[in-house]
Image (spheres, rainbow, N blue to C red):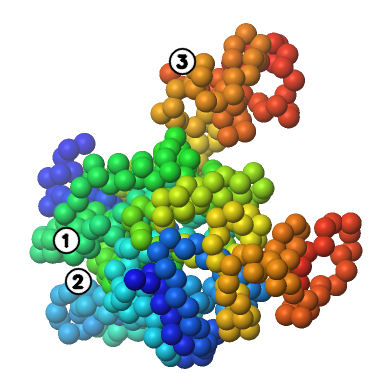
Amino acid sequence: MSVVRLDAATFGYDGRSVVSDVTLSIGPGEVVAVLGPNGSGKSTLVKGLLGLAEQLAGTAQVLGAPINEVDRGRIGYVPQRHTLANSVRATVAEIVATGRLSFRTWWKPWRRDPEADRQGVARVLEQVGLGDRAGADVSQLSGGQQRRVLIARALATNPDVLILDEPTAGVDHANQVALAQVLQDLVRDGTTMLVVTHELDALVDIVTRVVVIDTGTLVFDGTPADYTADNFPAHGHHHGHSPEQFPAPPPPLTGAPLDSGVARA
Amino acid sequence: MLDILDYGFMRNALVAALLIGAAAPLVGIFLVQRRLSLIGDGLGHVALAGVAIGILTATSPVLTALVTAVIAAVVIEVTRSRGRPGSDLALALMFYGGIALGVVLIGLSAEGTPANLTAYLFGSITATTTADLYVFLVLTVSVVALTLLLRPWLFAVAQDEEYARASGLPVTGINLTLSILTALTVVVSMRVVGLLLISALMIIPNAAAQAVSRSFAGAMRLAAVIGVICAVGGVFTSFYAETPSGATIVLLALGAFLLVNLAAALRRRRDAAHARAEAHAHEHGPGCGHEAVAHGDHVDYLHDGHRHAPHHDHYDEHATHRDHDHSPEQSGDRR
């Protein structure tokens, strides 16, 4: 059974399509990197799978059910966020516990199992290496640690598929390595993953398949090896894509390593 | 002191203050979290029109204010959540319209004295009737119970609406529930606090609690305690100083805000001299997995790039490698 099955699916907002005619089937245990320049529609694609963008055409199924019928608790979502700091204080455990709400029913709020919740939160925090930070004020954590809190929150639902939007963006190298390690452990446990990213380098060891979205259409679907061989230099400081696909960037003003044509946020 | 309890109106006012002192901050923390601190003000404005309708039609002003505020709350939430251009303007027009209509209608009524208007706008300890009190009691208990029961959902939706939606939580329903809870709080607060200052009791205790709390649950509890102290204290003060109760409560709350912030600043200064590491269950020791670093007369453990030194029942934060030479004098200062 496919975890994700799209057949000529089109997603967008307010009736306007952003990414169209995508046909894609993702099986259990696959780790799919979704690449593409900013504004290409790759985020809209995964938001479509989460029911956050409208499905405008085609068929789309996640875990064997149409998107508006799927049990959302089985999908773990790590949104693209640069900070968890909010206008009010919250601890790491309080944030992660929101992921446990998929086990509760809001119209029966008195039905709860605090012990299971506590253990569930402790387990996922241990998984992301933040076992000793449960009581910490989340705004005091580094960006990389906050990203791990978001992953823990997604894991707290015991998901069958994990969707991550730019998990490594804006995270320093040491934390990228820590994040990649967390994801690697999940891959070993057989978790199916969709990772929207600009930085294949950080994830190259775990990715089993690469999908490239450009200007709202799927332009590449293959193995990381094909992606690299097919004029897509994925290693080194280049993050990206063939010169034919994306215009070359202007020459760098400094001596910094040349980035690819992929615009960085 | 207790002789003031011989007055029926004071007993009513004190019970009402106790109820709203607890309820208002409990609802308010979610408004602060969603950056909607000013919504309560708008609802208060619109509720005045409801009060005026009650006075003019000789029905219960509390009842008409309740109906008006709940309808307004739903309209506000729907308008706001659509986020169309101009929705901000639409809300502003509604708020101005509410208060203007209220003032004009109350002026037209037989009871339309300036004193009466002031009581509605700024609160009065003599305003709470026994009939009101029973209504307030039922409403406040419902508001507090619903807020506490739904707290995990209210928190999740306010914390990250997109994630809540992706997780299949009933985001629209929860947001509407919060709006209605806010409307109910506005109405139960209008006698003692007054419609112009209601929002203050929802917001200021939370602003104060944020300064010293680390967790959401802790901040919520502290805000409720501050709310009760200020509301009850304000009613007492209002009796003796003969001031409008709402304004007195708000000034007390602002005083509490300043006091708590002062205490927090003093604590930060003390902590700067003696930096306590974040609490953790992990116990550092030989072979604990964290790198041990000799530091003067003791051993620090490298933990996420900073150094923890055992000190009584907790760990102190000692300087990092970068900004610290390891001279014993310095480490002596730090302990």
**Residue A108 - label:** 1
B234 over A21 or under it: above or below? above
Q: What percent of the width, then of the height, locates residue B94?
A: 40, 82
- To which residue does mark 2 refer? B62
Indicate the chain on which mark 3 is placed: B
As shown in the figure, which amino acid type bears the numbered disc 3? His
Instruction: Tell whether B334 sits left or right of B284.
Output: right
At 48% across and 72% down in the image, what residue appears? A46
The answer to which of A11 and B198 lies nearer the viewer is A11
**Residue A140 - label:** none
Q: What percent of the width, then of the height, locates residue B88?
A: 49, 79
The kind of secondary structure element at disc 1 is loop
Indicate the chain on which mark 2 is placed: B
Q: What percent of the width, then of the height, locates residue B26?
A: 31, 54
The kind of secondary structure element at disc 2 is helix
Q: Quadrant of residue B316?
A: top right
At 38% across and 69% down in the image, what residue appears? A3
The answer to which of B90 and A206 lies nearer the viewer is A206
Q: Quadrant of the C terminus of chain B?
A: top right
Instruction: Tell whether B139 sits left or right of A188.
Output: left
A142 over A47 or under it: above or below? above
At 75% across and 63% down in the image, what residue appears? A238
Indicate the chain on which mark 1 is placed: A
At 13% across and 64% down in the image, what residue appears? B135
